[in-house]
Image: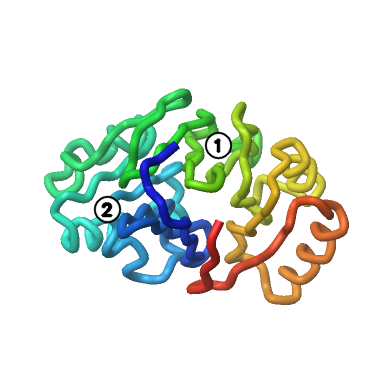
């Protein structure tokens, strides 16, 4: 467990991006093109699950790097290779893979998964890693664009509720397999408010023990 004492605050920053803060340290996961500008500024570290533009935006990373000369970016080998030649970001990249247990911005993190979910047989499958972040009162898991079930317990699941590669039956069954105490919707930028309401009603009914909720951009809570 981490040597931090305070609670972890999670803030939703649009689509699949979240900010985790504890005792003055900040970790931002997946600041992408659907995320508010400046979402990663002020972070001690950034974690990126995969290379799709809604999860990885180089302008977001560069802004965070300008704000913090010591910023480190943790991501998979494919993204690391892509950024290795860039003068402004290449030296900041830390490559992680399934089974790694890095300490990121003071958080103990376990890395799970290797591949993005299949969108279509005609579309190549890319690399994707998920990040299980351990707090003082439990663990939070961001799976990226995959339905990876960690071997270790997950108290708060960041659930990708809507994507070109998923349907609600898979989303519900995945949550049941992970068995979190609370579930926060992510990957929801393509949903209208009406659509988000439909998902909420269905997932509340299908997952009565998983504490499903949807935070709007800028909303926070402790876990």
Q: Which mark is residue 186?
A: none
Q: Which one is nearer the viewer's eye here, 211 or 200? A: 211
Q: Decide if residue 210 is on the left or right side of residue 12.
A: right
Residue for point 51% across, 72% down: 217
Q: Which one is nearer the viewer's eye here, 52 or 109? A: 109
Q: Which residue is mark 1?
A: 116
Q: Answer above or below: position of 141 versus 216.
A: above
Res 120 → quadrant: top right
Secondary element type, mark 2: loop
Q: Answer above or below: position of 75 versus 34.
A: above
Q: In the displayed image of the protein, which residue is found farthest to the bottom?
A: 193
Residue for point 53% across, 72% down: 219
Q: Which residue is mark 2?
A: 44
Which of the colour schemes (rainbow, by chain, secondary structure, one colour) is used?
Answer: rainbow
Rendered location of residue 202, percent (x, y) = 84, 60
Residue for point 75% across, 36% down: 177
Q: Decide if residue 218 is on the left or right side of residue 85.
A: right
Residue for point 56% across, 44% down: 138
């Amino acid at each position: 467990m981490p040597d931090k004492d305070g609670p972890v605050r999670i803030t939703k920053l649009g689509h699949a991006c979240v900010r985790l803060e504890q005792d003055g340290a900040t970790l931002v996961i997946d600041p992408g093109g659907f995320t508010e500008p400046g979402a990663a500024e002020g972070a001690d570290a950034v974690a990126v699950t995969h290379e799709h533009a809604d999860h990885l935006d180089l302008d977001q990373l560069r802004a965070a790097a300008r704000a913090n000369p010591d910023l480190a970016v943790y991501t998979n080998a494919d993204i690391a290779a892509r950024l290795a030649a860039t003068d402004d970001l290449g030296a900041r990249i830390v490559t992680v893979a399934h089974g790694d247990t890095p300490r990121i911005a003071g958080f103990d993190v376990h890395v799970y998964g290797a591949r993005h979910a299949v969108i279509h047989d005609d579309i190549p499958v890319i690399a994707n890693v998920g990040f299980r972040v351990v707090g003082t009162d439990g663990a939070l898991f961001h799976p990226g664009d995959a339905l990876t079930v960690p071997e270790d317990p997950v108290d708060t699941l960041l659930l990708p509720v809507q994507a070109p590669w998923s349907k609600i039956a898979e989303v519900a069954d995945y949550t049941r397999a992970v068995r979190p105490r609370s579930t926060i919707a992510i990957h929801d930028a393509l949903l209208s408010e009406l659509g988000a309401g439909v998902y909420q009603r269905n997932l509340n009914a299908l997952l009565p023990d998983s504490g499903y909720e949807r935070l709007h951009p800028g909303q926070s809570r402790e876990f």
